[in-house]
Amino acid sequence: MTVVRTRDTLPASGHSLLCPPLSLIRVHFSIRGTRLNKAAVQLIFVLCFCFLPIPTLAQCTDQLCQNLQNILDAAVTDFRAYGGNKTGGPEPSINEVKVPCQTMAWANNVSMYMCYAQVSYLNGQNWYGSTLDALKRLNPTWRFQINSPGDDHYVDAGPLDCENPPNDGPYTGDCPLHLQAVKQKDGTVKLHFWMTSLSSPYLIKRPPAPKAAPHTGANDCDDFCQNFKKVFVARMNSFDDIRTPKTNDEMSDATVKLEGAKKCIIKGTTRPNSKEVGMEFVCHWPETSGPAAEIRFHDLISRVQGLMPSSWSPHQENESDDYTGAKITKWFAVEPGGKHDVRIYVSGEAVGLHITTWN
């Protein structure tokens, strides 16, 4: 077998530089022997490669798409391109919809680039549609898991076989991108976009450190889960089992502290618009920004909701502080009969959790 190739020319459209058009190659078979020489074998592989499709890169001409491309590229290098600055990076903003961003870290220390805004309903829907369209153009091979109940939209995206990350943060194999637009009672929409690092060393899930004694609960019940269960049981006797001697007439420190909380106390309380009194366990998480507080708020809800009895119906609503007028978002679950309840609040950069028992 002999191979003769005509002069090299630039490939026509649709051909790779590594794959010349078939018309440029002539192959002659000889009846002398049956062995193929090395050049012929290599040629066969080249010809096979010619039939593979050559992907076309997404065209990114608008500013939103270019900024999203910048963020996705930065995730490949653990956002080192942003120099460790918490703010000041590219934003997925459109027209009058400004969506500021900052670098943050999950509970498992994996870096993330998180963007948040609260806008009008129309602007929120426009932003969601434009952002999702740009992301699909930038990542045509990704799987976009879209859930749109009513006016709300939730999207998790990543490689075809990726899974939704656990509460403490993503690991290798989890979807790195999340997008959501959630309508509020006042008609506005809260926008969230975050992209997780694709190269953080903390993406590798390490086995838990050995402990002196095994967990008393389920195998997948972490420290937050264990301590929450202790507090939840202690509500039955007004938290007497987990309180220190009173530091003053109104409150005392709790002997149990929930993960990440700055302080947890037990104090007396009064039901709003009523003379009914009770006791409550309270933990506070002061965060460094509104977006960080929102993440903590939703993380607490996802953790607590799975530990609540199925008969406790959850709700979420917005309200204003009676003294300052500050906007508060509240998630709560109430025991049938109303004797006990669990409430989680976010306002500005502050997050709080209350477990209450009423007399």
Image (cartoon, rainbow, N blue to C red):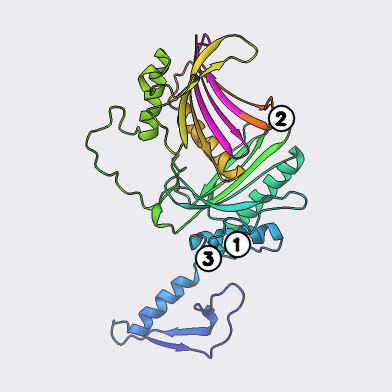
Residue, far front: 248
Give the magenta-colored segment's residue range. 330-356
Q: What element carries label 3?
A: loop
Q: Pointer 3: what residue? A: 53
Contact between labelled residues 1 and 2, with CB atoms less than 8 Å apart: no
The residue lying at 22 percent from left, 37 percent from top is 212
Contact between labelled residues 2 and 3, with CB atoms less than 8 Å apart: no
The CA distance from mark 1 to mark 3 is 27 Å
Q: In this view, does 38 lie to the left or right of 357?
A: left
On whether residue 24 falls in the magenta region, the answer is no
The residue lying at 60 percent from left, 40 percent from top is 349
Circle 2 or circle 1, nearest the eye: 2
Q: Nearer the viewer, residue 164 or 277?
A: 277
On whether residue 334 falls in the magenta region, the answer is yes
Q: Pointer 1: what residue? A: 70
Q: Is 269 above or below relative to 351?
A: above
Residue 70 lies, in percent from the top left, at: 60, 62
Q: Say few, some or many: other residues with alpha carbon within 10 Å of mark 1 (under 14 / 14 to 19 / 20 or more).
A: some
Q: What residue type is labelled 2?
A: Gly
Q: Pointer 2: what residue? A: 325
The residue lying at 58 percent from left, 59 percent from top is 71
Q: What element carries label 2?
A: loop
Image quadrant containing the N terminus: bottom left
Residue 19 lies, in percent from the top left, at: 50, 77
The CA distance from mark 2 to mark 1 is 39 Å
| Image quadrant assignment for residue 152 | top right
